Image (cartoon, grey):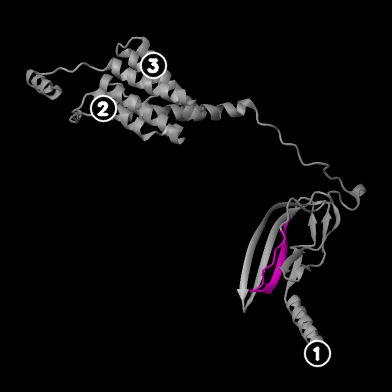
Amino acid sequence: MRRLITYFFILFTVVYTVNSQDIKVASSFDSTRIYIGDQINFTITVEQPSGLSLNLPFLKDSLCSKIDILSGPVIDSIVSNGRIKISQKYLITSFDSGFYQVPPVYAEMKNVDGLKRFYSDYSRLHVMRVNLAPADTSSKIFDIIEPYRAPVTIGEIIPWVLVVALIAVLTWAAIRFIRKLKKDKPGVEKVENPDPAHVIAFRELEKLRDEQLWQKGEIKSYYTRLTEILRQYLENRYNVFSLELTTAETLDALLKTGFKKDGTYSQLKTVLTGADLVKFAKYKPEPEENVQHFENSWDFVKETRKDEVISPENKDKKVEENL
């Protein structure tokens, strides 16, 4: 019986040793010599049977006190004939000259018998300084530093600024001219919406309220929709093509139609400027502000809506509908 146990222990030791020898961990640099500031790869390679589960190392910040990790790891694996080869590449550099020795890295394997580690060899790197001076400085004149480059003057910059400004003005003028030409193009009749401007605006405002965008956290979408409804209403009601204008241009165009700077004007200005803060300045309004801007929009449409001209036939029809 004792002899049988001895044979079993020897067999287990041999199998475990063979499995351990099947696991290889290696680490190396792309080159053993670099200059200060050069960037090369540090590669960790693990070869193992594909059925084993190993915990591979993960390095951060530096390999040692003078070798910094810039990025990585970039992981790759190859499976062949029941074995797997895993590699991790780190991009490294060093800004201090000298000879450096990186400690061995290891992969871990946990099983019922405990924790087993498999180590690589030491990795060595020589970081060299750049020798700027010739061997015999007494026989040759050399630059201590690179030639100095004179800074760019304002006189050199101004012509380019003027050219860019001129191109921008010409582009803006061309766009405005093309848009105006399309609006004034003869033979194109404007398609009138059968519904009055305020009916369209109220309908769209109700849809916006039912969608509950700001309650879902979609603040920017909420204000974009709200201002689009108001701008479309201004176009339908006052022929102010606000969708193509800024807030300041919109308010100025509205005043040119004879609109007065009264309470309704202030309501519109508050909504448009508040929406600009959200859309362009990343302002986060309180829930009460969201509700207030919606109510101001509704009141603006209500106060500025155009009275409908009802024919006798339509008047009788509306009376019947109300009944």
Q: Earlier in the sequence, mark 1 or mark 2?
A: 1
Along the viewing direction, whichever of 308 and 117 lies nearer the viewer: 117
Q: Residue furthest front?
A: 1
Q: Residue 17, image x and y in percent?
A: 77, 79
User: Would residue 176 be visible to someone looking at this image?
Assistant: no
Instruction: Name the residue that disc number 1 marks.
Output: 1
Residue type at tag 1: Met
Distance between mark 3 and mark 1 Cα atoms: 100 Å
Q: Nearer the viewer, mark 1 or mark 2?
A: 1
Residue located 30% across and 11% down the image: 258
Residue located 76% across and 71% down the image: 113
Element on which disc 1 rests? loop
Numbered disc total: 3
Relative placement, left or right, of 179 versus 117 is left
Residue located 76% across and 82% down the image: 12
Q: Quadrant of the N terminus?
A: bottom right
Residue type at tag 2: Ile
Distance between mark 1 and mark 2 Cα atoms: 98 Å
Magenta segment boundaries in residue numbering: 39-57
**Given contact means CB atoms under 8 Å apart, are the residues at marks 1 and 2 in contact?**
no
Instruction: Name the residue that disc number 2 marks.
Output: 200
Residue type at tag 3: Gln
Tell me the crowding category of disc 3: few under 14, some 14 to 19, or many 20 or more residues within 10 angstroms, Cα based.
Answer: some
Q: Residue 237, image x and y in percent?
A: 26, 20
Along the viewing direction, whichever of 164 and 270 lies nearer the viewer: 270
Q: Quadrant of the C terminus?
A: top left
